[in-house]
Image: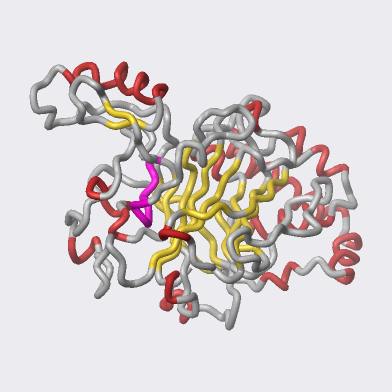
Amino acid sequence: MSNDELIGTNQFVCDPVYLGFAEDVTDSNRFRLRSHFMPLGKIGGKPSWLSYRPLPTAADLTCSNCQKTMCFLLQMYATRPHDPEHAFHRALFVFVCREPSCSQTNVASNFKVFRCQLPRVNEFYRSDRAYDPDVDGDVEPDEPVEKFTQLCEMCGCEATKKCARCELRWYCSKEHQAAHWKLAHKAECAVEGLKARVEFDNPIVFPEFGIGIDLEERDIEDFDDSDDDCNAAEDEDEGTEAARMAEYRRFLVEQQQQPTGGIDDTDVDEIEETNRDVRFKRFNRIIQENPDQILRYQRGGEPLWATDTAPVPTSIPDCELCGASRQFEAQLTSRLLPLIGVDAVGLSIDWATVAVFTCSASCAIPDHGYAPEFVVKQDFQ
């Protein structure tokens, strides 16, 4: 993620690990997450699309398991100085299916990730500078998205259907149109002119947060899982190891009071009994340095795999567009689960970590659209 000031204040020379943390948003500052402010990232709500056209189609966003529309989970602005000119702006968009039955152990078929890029000079944004919400305030975009496409009132994705009565509200599917009719549009549609929208709680989208970015202060090699480190871990006295597990249990209990997502007490018992799970020990130590992290970012780096009990891919498919190899770019942690309200153990979607691999060349995307990338999901067993 391009941020020269952050880079300048840290010991890293290359390939730093960026950490993402959820930030609360209020009605008064929600405008900061709109597309023309180029937010570093956001969780939930509706997507703040980078390119306004062409957007992912309804078919692109259909879950391959249940055939229902997937839900926008998270986006991150992810460019750096030596990216090609066609990727002056660059962002990743993550979608997930909300159906618990589609969340299969160590299978990422309920996730989709799209890469989007734009050159500096494009039809959507000014090229001289980005809008700064602290300086410019809540200004309207130079080119509103409605000039290029219509968005669904419920999910914010590409809309191809509109209300036959007023012809002013658009939807991606009949299901979302029916949901909006019951929640708000039945009252709106009877009003001549339809200028004001009826406010309503939207059950289709996840709760909305901003994403704040910081750098991991400790070098990842401090936690290296080499033979020496593994041997050292095995040589730890029982009291030290017990103290670590007790600390981790306390963290999980605190999250359960929200309640937690991802790991329950039984999971910890099973992991604790797996003394040879070196990856989990390393994962636990690193995550506990910054337990509220929801995102880890290190383009071209290595994923922080969560456990030895889940498979690690031996190969990653090359980019379908250009044939270049894919590289690791980012991963999500289970800290996201309680934030988005899908934390009922055994009754909701779940993951230990979700790793995203993207085209190493950041190749050009036809018509500046959205290119699918590769996802790996690990679960605790």
Measured as percent of width and height from the top left, residue 164 is found at 24, 22
Instruction: Confirm whether residue 257 shows in the render.
Output: no
Q: Residue lying farthest left?
A: 192
Q: From what the image shows, is residue 149 above or below residue 236? A: above
Q: From what the image shows, is residue 275 above or below residue 19? A: above
Nearer to me, 363 or 21: 363
Q: Residue at x 83, y 51 (%)?
A: 308
Nearer to me, 371 or 314: 371
Q: Which residues are magenta?
A: 45-53
Measured as percent of width and height from the top left, residue 183 is found at 30, 20
- Where residue 379 sits, quadrant-wise, is top right
Q: From what the image shows, is residue 375 above or below residue 195? A: below
Q: From what the image shows, is residue 26 above or below residue 152? A: below
In the image, is 252 to the left or to the right of 121?
Answer: right
Prevailing SS of the magenta stretch: loop
Tell me if residue 48 is in the magenta stretch.
yes
Q: Residue at x 41, y 77 (%)?
A: 5
Instruction: Confirm whether residue 118 shows in the render.
Output: yes
Q: Residue at x 30, y 45 (%)?
A: 149
